[in-house]
Image (spheres, grey):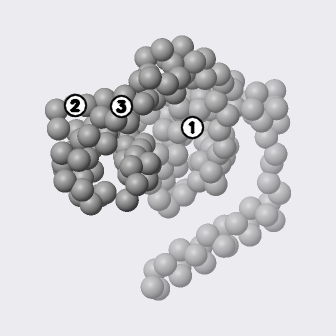
Amino acid sequence: MEISKLEGIIEAILFTMGESVELSKIALAIGHDEETTRKVVHNMMDKLNASDRGVRIIELEESFQMCTKADMYEYLIRIAKQPRKYVLTDVQLETLSIIAYKQPVTKLEIEKIRGVKSDHAVNRLVEYNLVCEVGRLDAPGKPILFGTTEEFLRRFSIQSLEELPSMNPEQMENFKTEAEEEAQMKLNI
């Protein structure tokens, strides 16, 4: 196999793994002995260090890792400081809706409504600053109460929670009926 092909394979391995990879594992993956593999990786290290590439390969005991060159950090910081755009999943939207309409609400109440654990969804919504802790319930364990934030209002272009759409009673009955039928089907399984 050509050296350029071996380098490409090693580059893909180190990039994909994201952390250090033992020399023996790299050698096994490319089908060569450790000494040959070490020479190929060191050659790659020299090439990367001599060029204006943004990455380098470092050696950690008997392992190698691909990482960013130190002089690239300022550019990474510029990217990291830019506001992140995120897309809410259906689970997160469902959880956010429950919090918006039922607030203040505990995770346990959210989970009773959804029928599944909601830790991850609530944590993401807190991370996105759409939901925050608004207090604690005066009950055993003092569970956290969650509510929406000003960022929630901004993102959904409303001035207050009173502007949230309301459901008509017929629609609410249909949802209740569907939920009861679904719960009954699960019990029968």
How far apart are the two marked residues, 1 and 3, measured between alpha carbons? 42 Å
Mark 2 closeness class: few <14, some 14–19, many ≥20 residues within 10 Å = few
Going 80% across and 60% down the picture, which residue do you hit? 169
- Left or right, 182 with reference to 155: left
Verify CB contact (< 8 Å) between mark 2 and mark 3. no
Asked which secondary structure carries label 3, the reply is helix
Q: Which residue in the structure is indicated by mark 2?
A: 60
Q: Position of residue 4 (x, y in %)?
A: 44, 48
Q: Earlier in the sequence, mark 1 or mark 3?
A: 3
Which is more toward the observer, 45 or 185? Answer: 45
On the image, the x and y values in percent for residue 39 come to: 26, 40
Q: Which residue is mark 3?
A: 45
User: How dense is the environment of label 3, judged by Cα within 10 Å: few (below 14), some, or many (20 and up)?
Assistant: some
Q: Which of label 1 and label 3 is nearer to you? A: 3
Q: At 55% from the left edge and 56% from the top edge, which residue is drawn?
A: 113
Residue matched to label 1? 125
Three-letter amino acid code at disc 2? Answer: Leu
The crowding category of the residue bearing disc 1, from other C-alpha atoms within 10 Å (few below 14, some 14 to 19, many at least 20), is many
Q: Residue at x 50, y 61 (%)?
A: 115
Seen at 27% across and 50% down, the residue is: 26
